[in-house]
Amino acid sequence: GQNIDQPTEMTATEGAIVQINCTYQTSGFNGLFWYQQHAGEAPTFLSYNVLDGLEEKGRFSSFLSRSKGYSYLLLKELQMKDSASYLCAVNRPEYGNKLVFGAGTILRVKS
Amino acid sequence: DARVTQTPRHKVTEMGQEVTMRCQPILGHNTVFWYRQTMMQGLELLAYFRNRAPLDDSGMPKDRFSAEMPDATLATLKIQPSEPRDSAVYFCASGSESYEQYFGPGTRLTVT
């Protein structure tokens, strides 16, 4: 089976740093993805972690600990346009690399 | 700028009617996914193709839904007959061996 858990909602202030956590329990694992989805739009790729550690890409960083089944997405210097839903997804190799998505975390950035 | 395209972008239909949604994956991508997104269920995988062959359609109600890839540039998702509970946004995504998936803009379906 699989469980992917994320907080439902978070609120943060413009210019601040926010960390969105994701925990997962899967019998197979071949990487963890983070996607951003603005209201009424399609998900867009943010990051991919397959090994433990931190991947940094501009204002966004993603961390993975496979032994703990844990990842986080770190957003720095928050901007109003970062208000969106952030989806954590796990790649399941035993199902032909299908992605299983969490329910998403709605991030609201306030001024 | 290569993108996944989907048609139609919006569809309103009456219960019992057939609905066909189309997707053109990014040229060169060998995997195509169909997802459904609702407020209640989130993003759910319906069907998945690799090199045009269906690999997984366990998420799809087989009695009314069907997914096909008649050629490498076209994937279709059909609902017959449609029901109000099918109202959702249907996304197509394509990818290659890098595992990253690129999503199309979606088809917003409303069944009355």
Image (cartoon, coloured by chain):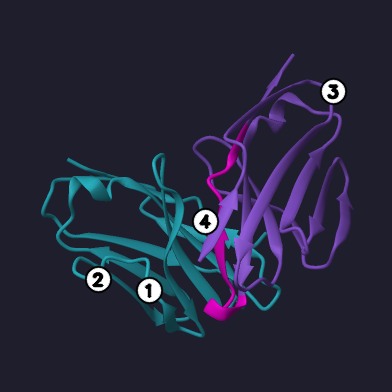
Chain colours: A purple, B cyan
Task: Identify which residue is drawn at 69% across, 58% down.
Answer: A33
Alpha-carbon neighbours of circle 1 within 10 Å: few (<14), some, or many (≥20)?
some
Residue ID at (88%, 54%): A54
Mark 3 = which residue?
A15
Residues tagged by mark 3 and mark 2 found on one chain of the structure:
no
- Which residue is labeled 4 in the image? B104
- Residue B109 or A18: which is nearer the viewer? A18
Image spot of residue B102 (x, y percent): 60, 61
Which amino acid type is shown beneath numbered disc 2? Answer: Lys
Q: Tag 1: residue type?
A: Asp
Residue that numbered label 1 is attached to: B57
Where is residue B65, by image quadrant? bottom left
Residue drawn where x is 34% and y is 46% of the image = B88
* Quarter occupied by residue A37: top right
Q: Which residue is mark 2?
A: B62
- Crowding at dot 3, Cα within 10 Å, few <14 / some 14-19 / many 20+, comes out as some
Q: Is residue B78 visible?
A: yes
Q: What quarter of the picture does the N terminus of chain B occupy?
A: bottom right
Secondary-structure class at tag 1: loop
Indicate the secondary structure of the residue bearing disc 3.
Answer: loop
Q: What are the residue bounds of the magenta stretch?
A: A93-106
Q: For the C terminus of chain B, which image quadrant?
A: top left
Q: Is residue A100 magenta?
A: yes
Tell me which chain the residue with mark 3 is part of: A
Q: Is residue B80 left or right of residue A111?
A: left
| Protein chain holding label 1 | B
Q: Residue furthest top?
A: A111
Q: Amino acid at mark 3?
A: Gly
Of mark 1 and mark 2, the one earlier in the sequence is 1
